[in-house]
Amino acid sequence: MNYLTKLQDSFWKHMLYSRQKCCLPGISGKLQKKVGRQEQWAKNCFRGRRGHFLRAGYRRGTSPAESAGLGYLVGPMGALLLNAVLATYLNVYYTDVLGLTGFWGGAFLVVFPIVSKIIDAVTNILMGYIIDRTRSRQGKARPWLLISAPLVAVTGVLLFTVPKASTAVQAVWVMVSYNLFYSVAFTIYYMSHNLMVPLSTRDTTQRGKLSVFNQIANIMMTGILVALIFPMLIMPAVGVDKPKWIALMSLLSIFALPLTVLEYYFTKERVTQEERESGGDKAVPFLKQLKAIFTDRYMLLIYAYFLIYLFGSTIKNLSLVYFCNYVLGTYNDGVTQTLISVIGGIPMGIGIFAVWPLAKRFGKRNVTLAGFILYALGSAICWMFPRSMVIMLVGQFIKNIGGLPCSYVFMALFADVLDHMEWKTGFRSDGLAMSVYNTINVAMVGICTGVFNGLLAGTGYVAPYYDAAGELIAVQSETVQGVITFGFVGLETFTGVILAVLLIFLNVEKTIGEKQAEIKARIAAGCEVQK
């Protein structure tokens, strides 16, 4: 079979997902005729009308599977890599390179993240409102992916290009650049990115696959590059050298630009298209959406889950570098953090093949619940023996096996809750619901960063420095080490138990198939009316 034949065969198989004017072909004779007309249109496209082909939503030379791989796996890698590096090392840059720990008597690094995240929370709500009211041929979330691409690149560079000036001037630059990145650029990107899976399809199996693609992208960036390559090779070379930090982070920021454009180019909002074609995409008042979200018990459970999980995991992420530098190993030794990350991260690779078969058999909720029991057990083992490398590696392995369902399937469960709400209310609130999720996310980042930095400053954290002989001094007191240890392994012992109990009540997937079928029937009726 030659190249063109293969391309045509792939196109005929999947063209209904991209250009059909009615969402449920085959439901009536009239619709069958309409599908036939769409097939004729597609044949005309292949007879040389390249512009029409591109507007169909597919790219010449790519199958739907390849497009999904490029859009949901490769595309997000740039922005997710940048965010993962920032989540792990930005606070280290502020404390160890810029030396802002003592500014305002240690209060700046406590107050500034909290204030910034209040601003970020407001912009998240605003962005959700804007997305829900966006009407375009490209969808409602997808256009914002394209807008976010240059913004993320530029503001990512500004985060690290802090001028040589007084500490007060540097603090102002940090405050402004931080909010330009997180409150504007990354808010636009992350909300649009997170909505692409629920808006791409209603099929739970397809959602699961796309969710796995997204998580693989995230895990590849965090688990391989940030957790493995960075501590072993990059951080020992960069150290506390500010020009090297600027060069490195500028490169990562610019790297995110073309990949985000790729994500935009190879994704498609089919759920939005269905709503538009059935006449069901009319704007719903903000307060009505807000009431629907905060009166739905499943959505409240989802938000409680996110709040508790993010509190524990954010403190853990903030503590990781400090724990490896001051408790388990020595400063930037290139080995300790690598071992913790590699052994702890191996389950993430295994999970690609194991989690979804288990979720299909036992249910997404049940598998996630069981996972958090292991999650709490692994954290407890680490907490009891924080200075033993062998026991720490065993405990991290167990904990990350438990965290697999959360990493790979939970966003698909969130998508089920969005469908449940549509079934109950008759309208979708994807943008606002996601903005509330992102608000919880950013609030936890701000609160946790402020709390963690406050504990460091309050217990006497000392930034690394060079003595008269040119030797780097990086040592902390037992009190500081105790705070760091609890942040890295102690807190998640408690959050794992709480989350396992909470998930008992999240049984939305039990009836979601029936509800999705009813939603499709409503949309089909709307299509008939529109005709």
Image (cartoon, rainbow, N blue to C red):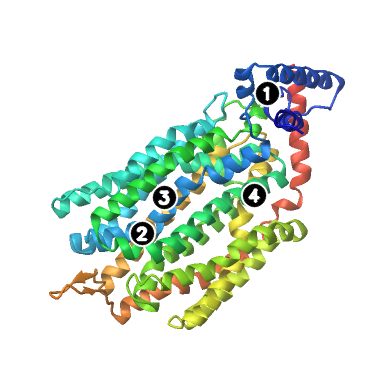
Q: Which residue is at a point 50% across and 57% down the rendered structure image?
A: 307
Residue 209 picture location, percent across and down: 67, 48
**Nearer to us: label 3 or label 4:** 3
Q: Residue at x 26, y 68 (%)?
A: 457
The quadrant of the image that shows the C terminus is top right
Q: What residue sits 62% from the left and 19% below the top? A: 50
Please identify, in this view, whether the residue under mark 3 or under mark 1 is nearer the observer: 3
Disc 4 from disc 1: Cα separation: 25 Å
Q: Which residue is mark 3?
A: 82
Around disc 3, counting alpha carbons within 10 Å, would you say few (fewer than 14), some (14 to 19), or many (20 or more)? many
Q: Are marks 3 and 4 in contact (CB under 8 Å)?
A: no
For marks 1 and 2, the one nearer the N-term is 2
Q: CA distance from mark 3 to mark 2?
A: 10 Å
The mark that comes first in sequence, 3 or 4, is 3
* Residue topped by disc 1: 277
Q: Amino acid at mark 3?
A: Leu
Q: Which residue is mark 4?
A: 412
Find numbered disc 3 in the image and state the secondary structure of the residue it sits on: helix
Q: Position of residue 174 (x, y in %)?
A: 26, 49
Estimate how packed mark 2 is, as few (under 14), some (14 to 19) or many (20 or more) residues with alpha carbons within 10 Å.
Answer: some
Label 1 secondary element? helix
Mark nearer the N terminus (4 vs 1): 1
Residue denoted by label 2:
89
Calculate the distance from the C-alpha at mark 1 to the C-alpha at mark 2.
46 Å
**Mark 3–mark 4 distance (CA, rounded to whole Å):** 24 Å
From the viewer's perspective, is the residue at label 2 or at label 4 nearer? 2
Q: Is residue 20 above or below residue 248?
A: above
Q: Amino acid at mark 2?
A: Tyr
